[in-house]
Image: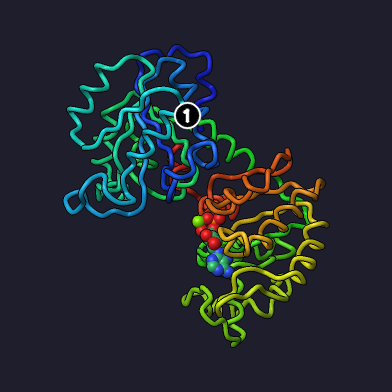
Amino acid sequence: MKYLSSLKNEDLAGKICLLRIDFNIEKAELAGAKNHPRLASVLPTIEFLTKKGVKVVILSHRGRPGKVSSIKYQVSSYTLKPFADILSKELVQKVNFMANFNFSEIRGEIKKSKPGSIFLLENLRYFEGEEKNDKNFAKRLASLGDFFVNDAFSVSHRANASVAAITEFLPSYAGFQLEKEIKNLSIAIKKPLVVILGGAKISDKIGLLKNFMAEADYFLIGGGMAHNFLLAQGLPIGNSIFEEKTIGFAKKMLKNRKVILPADYVIKDRKILDIGPKTLEKYSEIIKNAKTIIWNGPMGYFENPKFAKGSEEIAKAIMANKKAFSIIGGGETTSLMSKVKCQKSNVFLSTGGGAMLEYLAGKKMPGIEALNK
Ligand code: ADP
Ligand code: MG
């Protein structure tokens, strides 16, 4: 793999870099870059490039908007336009938003621009070719630049044109954040290994359970995931969130002694919204003795401070264990950490959720494989 950091002493002035980052963030307009770990994490790569006089063309997606013909640009939660303003403020530099995909026009604008200029293309998933990893689409994108940098770890488990196929047409590098992710997530796992799983995207996390079954010593379950286990035991969950398709798997897991379920819950309006105090005591004790900790998925509906205690106490227990190396990932899980003020060298905050889980599980990731070729 080639790293962008290896170009520190190269003269790149006037070159055009296609930079893939991940702006697939809900309500980021409200957060601003500094408050959002995934946004903050890409600023060093952009600054490095612009300081070298590289023209930066940012590629991203946001949500699944469907085909270009069926969508009105810039409406809804699909447009990337707000990110041009967020980045402009953060970088104190204009970020030119390219609202349409007129490639010859875009090429002209880039050519006219000064070294160090920044462009942001509209949501690439307006093109079908993006998610199909289509070579022709990748080639058209590649025609806009001189080299490609992937700094979007959180989409590197997707075979998408702007992540994978594009590397066939341009010299390609891993950006600073992607480099950090790869190095931190490749650590040797020391035992006991404690894996903490919660959140709402249950099937993503079930994958980790399967993949770490042999290696992990404990799985501490919380969040929506726990409700699936309650259902598997035939217990009622009222109006709590759950996921139908993974109940069968939860049933199989019930007999596994590594899988630890909450002992109590915080309930409101027939909904389980957090784990309870007995659970916290039990989980904190297990966390205390861990040598490696992996956490993905909040323990409850933490966006409401009334139900944040479970997640915050778990965060504190992790930080209190100075013997362990801890990996925490996921969009919501890491934004939760920014509230708890995490300043510890042996905690790595990954920008990936699903991607982190796949990487840790040793799966081959299309975006990373593409850079290895
Ligand atoms: P991540 O983004 O960290 O990978 P997920 O996207 O899987 O995590 O899930 C995060 C969401 O799960 C949060 O918005 C949180 O409110 C929600 N959540 C966790 N537990 C519950 C619960 N018991 N009831 C409702 N929502 C929950
Ligand atoms: Mg999420």
| Residue 177 left/right relative to 283 | left
Q: Position of residue 309 (x, y in %)?
A: 68, 61
Question: Is residue 196 at least partly visible in the picture?
Answer: yes
Whether residue 195 is situated above or below residue 258 in the rendered picture: above
Q: Position of residue 12 (x, y in %)?
A: 42, 15
Q: Nearer the viewer, residue 33 or 199?
A: 33
Q: Residue at x 52, y 51 (%)?
A: 331
Colouring rule applied to residues: rainbow
The kind of secondary structure element at disc 1 is helix
Q: Nearer the viewer, residue 197 or 357?
A: 197
Question: Is residue 205 at least partly visible in the picture?
Answer: no
Q: Residue at x 70, y 53 (%)?
A: 315
Q: Residue at x 70, y 73 (%)?
A: 262
Whether residue 310 is situated above or below residue 68 in the rendered picture: below
| Residue 57 left/right relative to 271 | left
Q: Position of residue 347 (x, y in %)?
A: 70, 44
Q: Quadrant of residue 293?
A: bottom right
Q: Quadrant of residue 181?
A: top right
User: How many C-alpha atoms fall within 10 Å of the one at disc 1: few (<14), some, or many (≥20)?
Assistant: some
Q: Is mark 1 within 8 Å of ligand 1?
A: no
Q: Position of residue 362 (x, y in %)?
A: 58, 52
Q: Residue furthest bottom?
A: 234
Please state the total of marks drawn on the protein image: 1
Q: Which residue is mark 1?
A: 90
| Residue 234 left/right relative to 26 | right
Whether residue 146 is situated above or below residue 29 in the rendered picture: above
| Residue 233 left/right relative to 17 | right
Q: Amino acid at mark 1?
A: Glu
Which of the image's four quarters has the C terminus? top left
